[in-house]
Amino acid sequence: MANGSVRVRFCPSPTGNPHVGLVRTALFNWAFARHTGGTFVLRIEDTDAARDSEESYAQLLDSLRWLGFTWDEGPEAGGPHAPYRQSQRMDTYREIARKLRDAGHAYHCYCTASELEERRDAARAAGRPSGYDGKCREVTPEQRTRYEAEGREPIVRFRMPDETITFTDLVRGELTFTPENVPDYGIVRANGAPLYTLVNPVDDALMKITHVLRGEDLLSSTPRQIALYEALMELGIAKAVPSFGHLPYVMGEGNKKLSKRDPQSSLNLYRERGFLPEGLLNYLSLLGWSLSADQDVFTIEEMVAAFDIADVNPNPARFDLKKAEAINADHIRLLDVKEFTERCAPWLKAPFAPWAPEDFDEAKWEAIAPHAQTRLKVLSEVTDNVDFLFLPEPVEDEVSWTKAMKEGSDALLRTARAKLEAADWTSAESLKEAVLAAGEAHGLKLGKAQAPVRVAVTGRTVGLPLFESLEILGQEKTLARIDAALAKLAA
Ligand code: GLU
Ligand code: ZN
């Protein structure tokens, strides 16, 4: 579909840290806009003063930029429907709420919370639908006067048409909602504050949104919004009802819905662990979509070229951290090595790096980087993998030590030291031969022979390819560390 008239929106509320579900929604909207040559609108739904914060707002924009999303209209970008922060559009909502009331599409509801609850309970007990019962649909002038004398402050409620609403969801196909399942609903609080139920479809109408792509959790608000849209069309405020597509739930551990509050869902976590934005987006795109059955790793450009909302799978998607890391690892390998070294920069200094800044050696880093690049799942792992090069002494990891240092390790280390002293230090191959020969002298295969050497030199049982590591560290330091390990074994 090439269609420059597509207009989609991503409309987060700035409450707390962005989570992966939100990023997936942004991604699908963005990819759909880019694929169709349409417009991607960023709107900030910050009408809930109690929950929204400037800090979250700043973080949201920063996150979107880090991910590489660009918006055609929205905060900072501007556009024909500015302002794009709902907190700055309150007059518009007030006026539209009034028009809806004047036209009879909405009415004042004077019921108190306890009255509503009482009637809800009674309806449930009688097996009737328990939503709002329409009591205030026809309030007489006398009743109104009495309510007001009682000091009741009304909310504004939208009058749902008494008819079945059917629409074709772009992901889930035809869906039908009967009136008893969609009761009249509040659109303005008693204190005059407009609710999501009003401001979201009103802005979609005013901003001429053509496709609403959002999470399945919002499916129940769609019939209400369609009815409100139709009222807005009657008032000449909206032109057409947009198409809706509801993206599948994302399931986390134990097959429970991944919630915003799950630590696993925090975008910052992935950023701090050194996911590449392209790796994370590639993975998140698979939560409901795929490029092809046999290709999990692709670029964002490939996704954009292929993306169609009609291909989104309605079944719940499972969030799988291992798979996310594997895909990220592939993206790390796709970088050119210079780009890789640059992207690692944050993890090679404080607060992540434990070494003194003056002990960092750029040449050694550049030498080891290609080996690191093929091994990392996330960039933050680089620190532990290269710290042996920049710390005066290897880290002390008792678990590694106990695992590698067996009976006879001292004898092996002594032989290895002698052979390494005589080896050609311009070739990792020669260092390998040295350790191989030392192993043979003690009846050990290479794997067993290199374990104590690795722990003596790097402090850990696992790490980057050993002989290249030794070569880059240099002969003097390598031998000194073996000596230190021998001294520790003797003690
Ligand atoms: N502000 C709403 C949210 O973050 C947007 C929902 C929608 O896309 O309609 O949940
Ligand atoms: Zn009422």
Image: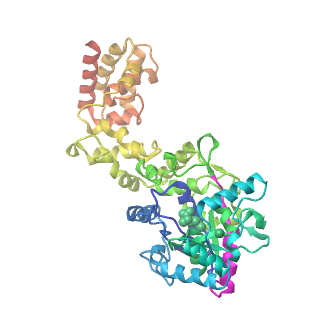
Q: Quadrant of residue 237?
A: bottom right
**Numbered disc total:** 0
Q: Quadrant of the C terminus?
A: top left
Q: Quadrant of residue 474?
A: top left
Up/down of 359 relative to 33, above or below = above
Q: Residue at x 29, y 21 (%)?
A: 417
Q: Residue at x 69, y 59 (%)?
A: 119
Q: Is residue 38 visible?
A: no
Magenta stretch encompasses residue 241: yes
Up/down of 27 relative to 154, above or below = above
- Counting from the top left corner in percent of width and height, residue 299 is at 55, 60
Which quarter is ligand 1 in?
Answer: bottom right
Q: Which residues are magenta?
A: 223-249
Q: Which residue is at the front of the view, 21 or 83?
A: 83
Q: How is the image coloured?
A: rainbow
Residue at the limit of the structure toward the left, as seen here: 358
Q: Quadrant of the N terminus?
A: bottom right
Magenta stretch encompasses residue 191: no
Up/down of 484 relative to 364, above or below = above
